[in-house]
Amino acid sequence: MSRTKVVPIPVMGRHNINAYLLLGRRPVIVDAGTPGSGRKILDQITAHGVDPADVALIVITHGHIDHFGSAAELHRLTGAPVAGHMADLGPYRSGRAREPYLPTGPMGRLMARNRKLHVRAEPVDPAVLIRGETGLEDYGLAARIMPTPGHTAGSVSVLTDDGDLVAGDLIAGSFMGLVPGRPANPPFHDDPRQNLASLHEMLALDPISLHVGHGTPLDPGRVRRWAEKEGDRLARLDAAGRLPVRGE
Ligand SMILES: [Zn+2]
Ligand SMILES: [Zn+2]
């Protein structure tokens, strides 16, 4: 089978916020940007030679509005079904992310005050509910949706059979991608330790590259070294009783 191409679709800046176009036998969109960016995403996939009516599926990686903000609009524009994990159904159906956001560091604390983060997106009701690992062969893609909880409870990644991991906010580029190639936490994680465990699980599958919601593609070797240090950092925070975890 021919290789699945992973094409970044910038939604904000050159790579501050990305959606992705996966080109296999059929095209699949991963993530849907901020509210009001459906047309911008559509224009870009059209520029890549894709007829919007051919889009087989729109996968949303999690219930933050910079990822599902235009899912309902893209569904209308393409007719493609939306896939999202059960555990983030609340945000999808209400159009609101689960709050408060739990900052991973100073940048998250700063960003949590940004009003844009707290706007309401158009609600979306995913027709394809993800409950576990899900093959995408039926949608013309040699890839699987992998649950990777932690950033949010319903976070998922898409792993192609070629080894490209489209990872949402499982990991990010430093300063929302301003430092190319350097791994970092995104500004928020609901459960940092669960997220790190999900990241280790994905790294154990030997991906060849990690394509993130915020930033340029990341080298798995570099992410592995970062993850070791992050494990130590979280252990220190935990020992000091300062590890933030969302209560139920
Ligand atoms: Zn997020
Ligand atoms: Zn994000």
Image (cartoon, rainbow, N blue to C red):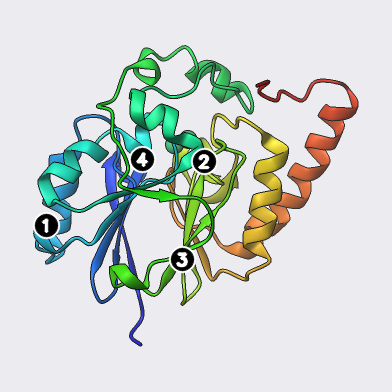
The residue to which callout 1 is attached is: 52
The residue to which callout 4 is attached is: 17
Q: CA distance from mark 1 to mark 4?
A: 21 Å
From the viewer's side, name the closer residue of 163 and 91: 91
The residue to which callout 3 is attached is: 144
Amino acid type, residue under disc 3 in the picture: Arg
Amino acid type, residue under disc 2 in the picture: Gly
Label 3, residues with CA under 10 Å away: few <14, some 14-19, many ≥20: some
Identify the residue at image location x=56%, y=46%. 171
Q: CA distance from mark 3 to mark 4?
A: 23 Å
From the viewer's side, name the closer residue of 161 and 213: 161
Q: CA distance from mark 2 to mark 4?
A: 19 Å
Q: Is residue 108 above or below residue 1?
A: above
Q: Is mark 4 within 8 Å of ligand 2?
A: yes
Question: Circle 2 — which element?
Answer: loop
Q: State which mark lies toward you, 1 or 3.
A: 3
Q: State which mark lies toward you, 1 or 4.
A: 1
Q: State which mark lies toward you, 3 or 4.
A: 3
Amino acid type, residue under disc 1 in the picture: Pro
Q: Quadrant of residue 70?
A: top left
Mark 3 vs 2, N-terminal side: 3
The residue to which callout 2 is attached is: 154
Question: Circle 3 — which element?
Answer: strand
- How far from the left and from the top, in percent, is residue 126? 32, 43
